Image: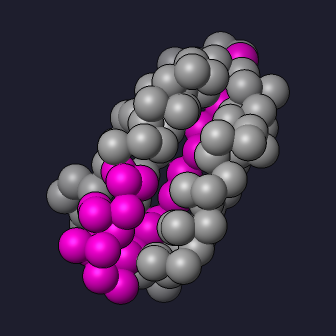
Amino acid sequence: MSAFLIADVHPADMDAYRDSGYLEAVPKIAARFGGVYRARGGQLEKLEGNWQPRRLVIIEFPSWDKLQAFCHCDDYQPYREIRQRLADSNIVALEGLDTPLA
């Protein structure tokens, strides 16, 4: 069953964020765990509610365990620290469905 990492990431300084290497390195690390980017900072429209997402990222992993392994792997930790230093972010993990709803 797939699992999704959903992140609302708003860098204070996009140039510094880009220059940090985060945007190039993290997709490669995620790919080693089967992570596939499904959305990354594209057009966004709030349809309902109070949530004000600014820049969403959605990464699909083949399983919950692979998502967790990515999040806690040694290679990702320096980039997690970069993101935490350079961006305001909220990140959740969501387990996918066994069978898609009709």
Q: Looking at the image, which residue is at 68% across and 36% down?
A: 70
Would residue 20 be seen by someone viewing this image from the given angle?
Answer: yes
- In this rendering, the answer to whether 26 lies above or below 13 is above
Which sits in the foreground, 59 or 17? 17
Question: Which residue is depicted at the point 35% across and 85% down?
Answer: 12
Horizontal arrangement in the rendering, residue 93 relative to residue 87 (left or right): right
Rendered position, 72 above or below 49: above
**Coloring scheme of the render?**
one colour
Q: Is residue 101 in view?
A: no
Instruction: Please name the residue shown 74% across and 39% down the image.
Output: 73
Does residue 97 sit above or below 27 in this rendering? above
Magenta-tinted stretch: 1-23
Which of the image's four quarters has the N terminus? top right
Q: Does the magenta stretch include residue 7?
A: yes
Residue 72, how many percent across, how many down? Answer: 77, 44
Q: In this view, does 99 lie above or below 81?
A: above
**Percent from the top left, x then y, of residue 95?**
72, 35
Quarter of the figure with residue 99: top right
Q: Is residue 8 magenta?
A: yes
Which one is nearer the viewer's eye here, 47 or 12? 12
Left or right: 87 as drawn, with respect to 74: left
Total numbered badges shown on the rendered structure: 0
**Residue 15: % across, % down:** 22, 73
- In the depicted view, which residue is nearer to us: 51 or 72? 72
Residue at horizontal 64%, vertical 40%? Answer: 75
Q: Where is residue 14 in the image (x, y as percent from the top left)?
A: 26, 73
